[in-house]
Image (spheres, grey):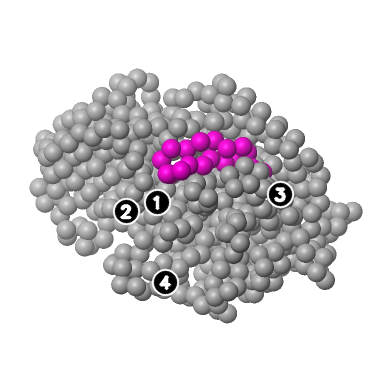
Amino acid sequence: MTTLNPGIALANDTESNDPVLTPIADHAERLAAAEAGVAALAATRNDRWYPRFHIASDGGWINDPNGLCHYNGRWHVFYQLHPYGTQWGPMHWGHVSSPDMVHWRREPIAFAPSLEQERHGVFSGSAVIGDDGRPRIYYTGHRWANGKDNTGGDWQVQMLAEPDDDELTSFTKLGMIIDCPTDEVDHHFRDPKVWKTAGTWYMTFGVSSKDKRGQMWLYTSPDMVHWTFDRVLFEHPDPDVFMLECPDFFPITDANGNEKWVIGFSAMGAKPRGFMNRNLNNAGYMIGTWKPGESFKPETEFRLWDWGHNFYAPQSFATDGRQIMYGWMSPFVSPISMEEDGWCGNLTLPREITLGADGDLHTAPVKEVEGLRLSTVELGSMHVEPNQDVTILDDAQSTEIEMTIDLNATNAERAGLRVHATPDDHGTTIVYDAQTGRVVIDRQNVAHGDRGYRAAPLSEEELANGTLTLRVFIDRGCVEVYVNGGRQAMSSYSFSGEGPRAVQLIAESGAMQVSGLTVHELDSIGL
Ligand code: FRU
């Protein structure tokens, strides 16, 4: 039995392995208080950078996407929420839903801490549809081991909840289903993902082993409720990596019918190396193979899902033959300018993960995102003279740009766009950098917040191809860039200065030839 907190018996009943339910508060009261907390922050919100077409909370802090699913004709996105402040704090689950992944509505907050095992937070988790056609929610219950803060480490266990209605507006918690073997674990033990293969339910989650290695553990269950440890599914080869947050695991098939398995995780501890791992922690994947009764066998190195400044803790789910992923645009480097504004953090657009003919994963916005387009202007081809800025939009705060650069007819050192370009000469540049052969988001001249640049690679084949396509989404406080149809993606916050936010074509120390340029004005997603 786990006895970190003397006097409280919380371990699974080892005989029956049944869920353990230990209420400490009225859930409905906790949820009502959380709604009031969000409303109070929303009432004073400053909208200068509040997103128009990215999912965010009305007020308060959010992080990881949770519980993603398509159920009963609606898309559901839950997310980690701190309803009482604009910094990370005791975690709840916020919730939005949509009939089409374009128009969203707010749903009641789904979970607040109300059981002993989740006293200090209802942490991340996922949804899966059972054989009876109804979703289950698996998440991590979190407590601080010393009862108050992170100086004594975490005490984390896996939990189960079931919906009370088909709109997923209220849930019944079943309690703890997997206790933490604290002798084998260095505190971190969280973020369950569940799926079924060949008649057996599987769960994996992230673990820091007792010798501080980042691992994913695998459990099995015949009934989604009673779980047994199977094996370590994967251990990260890098000894610096001490925890794999928000692990993901799914099969994917390429156009020729070849199936692979993909593990995704958010690695804590990896050191920066050249252009890689520049963020505080970094989310990526490996492609390989897996069969029941085995560990995962990687066939690739670790690759980033996204090369921007702000991408973390993505989660994917399978539906209608598609694998769809949302990420969190993590802002974890100070100053986090939006924290002053009554809200903090948004998710990325939904991306479809595909396995390309090049053997790598591609992520492009799901086709539904085109439904956001309100109007479209074709600007055609344009030549930009060396060091000349050409303003194409006077004020773009909810805009998608599709742009093709003719690399053979471009000799600029850096060629592309300046967005959020305000009259005070601030802005963020999104450019092809000929010296490195990479696509760069450069925030050295941004008006507020963290600076620095990030650089996504292009393959030899993409460079030899002679054209580069960029699909750039410009929201009020962030940008997303998709390179060559999703071969690479980049997500970064970009906190503009005062006044209209122009978009300019730029060509530094040489000319740029744009062979295609289309501008779409985008609708709000309704949140
Ligand atoms: C990742 C993460 C998860 C955890 C959650 C807590 O950002 O640390 O591992 O469940 O956030 O909010």
Marker disc for residue 486: 2
Write the start and end of the magenta stretch as one range: 94-111
Q: In the orientation shown, which residue stands out farthest toward the bottom?
A: 293
Return the disc, 4 or 1, that comes first in the chain's sequence: 4
Disc 2 to disc 1, C-alpha distance: 9 Å
Instruction: Give the SS element for disc 2.
Output: loop
Task: Give the main secondary structure of the magenta stretch.
Answer: loop
Side (left or right) of 225 relative to 507: right
Disc 4 to disc 1, C-alpha distance: 19 Å
Identify the residue under disc 1: 351
Return the disc, 4 or 3, that comes first in the chain's sequence: 3
Residue beneath the point at 74% across and 57% down: 176
Identify the residue under disc 3: 172
Vertical arrangement, residue 427 with respect to residue 23, above or below: above
Return the disc, 2 or 3, that comes first in the chain's sequence: 3
Return the disc, 1 or 3, that comes first in the chain's sequence: 3
Mark 2 vs mark 1: in front: 1
Disc 1 to disc 3, C-alpha distance: 30 Å
Residue 140's quadrant in the figure?
A: bottom right
Q: Nearer the viewer, residue 210 or 47?
A: 47
Q: Position of residue 469 (x, y in %)?
A: 23, 49
Identify the residue under disc 4: 260
Side (left or right) of 517 relative to 210: left
Residue 225's quadrant in the figure?
A: bottom right
Q: Are marks 2 and 1 in contact (CB under 8 Å)?
A: yes
